[in-house]
Image (cartoon, rainbow, N blue to C red):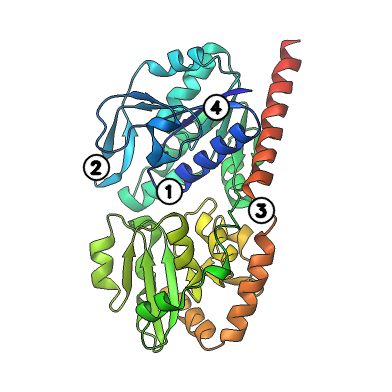
Amino acid sequence: MRVVIVTESFPPDVNGVAHCTLQTARHLVARGHEPLVIAPAPAGTTTASRRDPSDAPETDAPCPVLRVPSLPLPGYPQVRVALPGRRLTTALAAHRAELVHLAGPFVLGARGMAAAARLGLPAVAVYQTDLAGYARTYLGTGENTAWRRMRAVHSAADRTLAPSTAALRDLTGHGVPRVRLWPRGVDTVRFRPALRDEPLRRRLAPGGETIVGYVGRLAPEKHVGLLAGACALPGVRVVVVGDGPSEASLRTGLPGAVFLGRRTGDDLARVFASLDVFVHTGPYETFCQTVQEAMASALPVIAPAAGGPLDLVDHGRTGLLVPPLDARAVADVVAALAADPARAAAYGATGRAAVEGRTWQAVGDQLLDHYDEVLRDRTAVAA
């Protein structure tokens, strides 16, 4: 099958859309399909370029990648926004695409949807980002506008794939048709408890403190400042992994926390395995891949009872869910797990067992089933 993946983000970007798109492209190639990825050009690139894996080793791209010109999002330069252009339709036709996969469609994805429609190609849209929540966080308004935009794009697709039951409810509740569930995989070989690094732990917590970690972007919508109460707990060391526009304010607002910056690959897996407790603070996650990576690392998880974590965290078995945006609740459950390491370890072991079957290979095959159903439906209508 010849597939064009139009994505709002791709490595070297580090986020859920980029990671899922890379894993999707890898799986398509592994199963003998021929994908082409179309993505915004990263920082430092001013012109569109056609790349193959040997041209783009920094992305570990398994297939050709067409980069289109982009600009940084004002106030958040890590996020790139594709500029208008006419190359999408040409690229789809040149690749002889049989299906278009839209990853987190909003700007470039909307143009990809329009190009697919012009060429009469089926399209599968993957919902990955709570843009209405982001509008609420950054603008204090604009939720309805964001939903109108998302509804228009997703309604034009043959199928929309939601990563969690909460996301599926949001989409159907806002009038998006033909929504199905498609979760995310996790690399349980890379993320594993055996990577626990005692020298690293001694550097992070020289007094033998319980190490409580957050991994993710440092941005307003993530509400990492909710960890301030945990920073004040005796015998607890907060470790923050990631970068973003909120880093400077968080360094001030989380006294005593250790900031490790962006970590990826095996280095990130080693940090995960060296934590004692994982905390995610953002209430707008459509899935929350770092929760799965923490579970694969046999960590107990603390997360808000909202969005994607509701599917991932089995409260009282693999971790604890807390009311969203409740700093006191976060501090209380951190203190409870720090005081009961046996309970924390039991949650972590159960979490590891829960994700062992959620491989990217299994999830990728589910995606191919969705593709096949969409293509069959198109053939039936044409007949």
Identify residue type, mark 4.
Pro
Q: Is residue 314 visible?
A: no
The mark that comes first in sequence, 3 or 1, is: 1
Q: Residue at x 44, y 67 (%)?
A: 271
* Element class at badge 4: strand
Q: Earlier in the sequence, mark 2 or mark 4?
A: 4
Task: State the SS at label 3.
Answer: loop
Q: Which residue is mark 1?
A: 15
Q: Position of residue 117 (x, y in %)?
A: 53, 16
Residue assigned mark 4: 35
Q: Hey, which quadrant is residue 84 in on the image? A: top left
Please say if the residues under marks 2 and 3 sit with CB atoms less than 8 Å apart: no
Circle 2: element type? loop
In space, the residues marked 3 and 1 are separated at their CA atoms by 19 Å
Q: How many marks?
A: 4
Please name which of the two marks, 2 or 3, marks the residue nearer to the observer.
3
Residue 237 location (% of width, % of height): 38, 80
What amino acid is found at the position of numbered circle 2 in the picture? Pro
Image-based side of 215 in relation to 356, left or right? left
Where is residue 286 shown, x and y percent of the image? 53, 50
Front in this rendered view, residue 277 or 378: 277
Task: Provide the residue designation for mark 3.
Answer: 358
